[in-house]
Amino acid sequence: MRIYEGTPRQDYEEVLRSIGAFLDQRAMRDVLLTEAPDGFIVQGLAGASMEEAALADAQPIQKETYTFLDDDIARFMEEAAARRGRGAPRPDLVQAGPYERAFRVLGRYFDQQKPRDVFFFEQEGAYVIRLLMSTRTGARHVLAEFTADELRQMVDDASHWRGTGGRPQR
C-alpha cells in the first residue's frame, strides 16, 4: 500500500483491524481479503439469511465486494482510533466485533512475518492465508491455516500483549 511506500510495512495489525471493524458493521461473513498495490479488495457475504429475510422483509444474503484504497484505510484507522478513545476503560474489548478482533491478531502475525503482500479467506471462523515472502532466491508464497479454535486462542492471548511493548504481561 502507498501508506507504507518507501518503508517496510510494519502495521498490518492496525490496517486490518480497521477493515475488520468495517466488516463487523456490515455484518459480513465468509470473507476474502487480497492486497492490491493501492489498497485492499474485500469480498464477503452480507445480508439476512433466507429465514430472516422471509420474516423481516429483508434482502437475502448477497456477495458484496469492496475496494479500499489508501485514503479509505487512513480514514477507517482514524475513525477506529477515535471510537476506541471513548467509553469503557477497555473499549477495544467492549466494542470490537469478531472480525476486528480476528483481523487484528492476523495483522500482528503478518507484521511479525514481514510479507510483501497478503491474501486470506475465512470460512466459519477458520482462516487460510497466503503471504508473499522475500527470500534469498526471490519471492515465494507461504501458506498457513488457523482453525477457529486456534484463532480464538490467538485473540485471547492478545490481551496479554497489550500495553507491554510486545512483552507478555505477568
Image: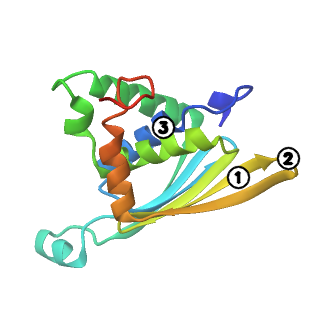
Give x and y (percent) for residue 7: 71, 26
The image quadrant that residue 122 belongs to is: bottom left
Relative height, residue 1 to residue 132 (above, below): above
Give x and y (percent) for residue 109: 52, 45
- Tell me whether the residue at label 3 lies in contact with that at label 1, contact meaning CB atoms closer than 8 angstroms: no
Q: Residues within 10 Å of mark 2 (few under 14, many from 20)?
A: few
Q: Residues within 10 Å of mark 1 (few under 14, many from 20)?
A: some
Q: Residue at x 85, y 51 (%)?
A: 138
- The amino acid type found where label 2 is placed reads Arg
In the image, 14: left or right of 5?
left
Q: Residues within 10 Å of mark 3 (few under 14, many from 20)?
A: many
Residue farthest toward the right in the current orientation of the protein = 137
Relative height, residue 34 to residue 12 (above, below): below
The image quadrant that residue 95 belongs to is: top left
Mark pair 2, 3: CA separation: 26 Å
- How many marks on residues? 3
Q: Residue at x 22, y 22 (%)?
A: 86
- The amino acid type found where label 1 is placed reads Leu
Q: Which residue is mark 3?
A: 13
Q: Which residue is mark 1?
A: 132
Q: Which residue is mark 2?
A: 136
Mark pair 3, 1: CA separation: 17 Å
- Tell me if I can see residue 64 in this picture: no
Which of the image's four quarters has the N terminus?
top right
Q: Nearer the viewer, residue 131 or 137?
A: 137
- Tell me if I can see residue 63 in this picture: yes
Which of the image's four quarters has the C terminus?
top left
Relative height, residue 1 to residue 34 (above, below): above
Q: Nearer the viewer, mark 2 or mark 3?
A: 2
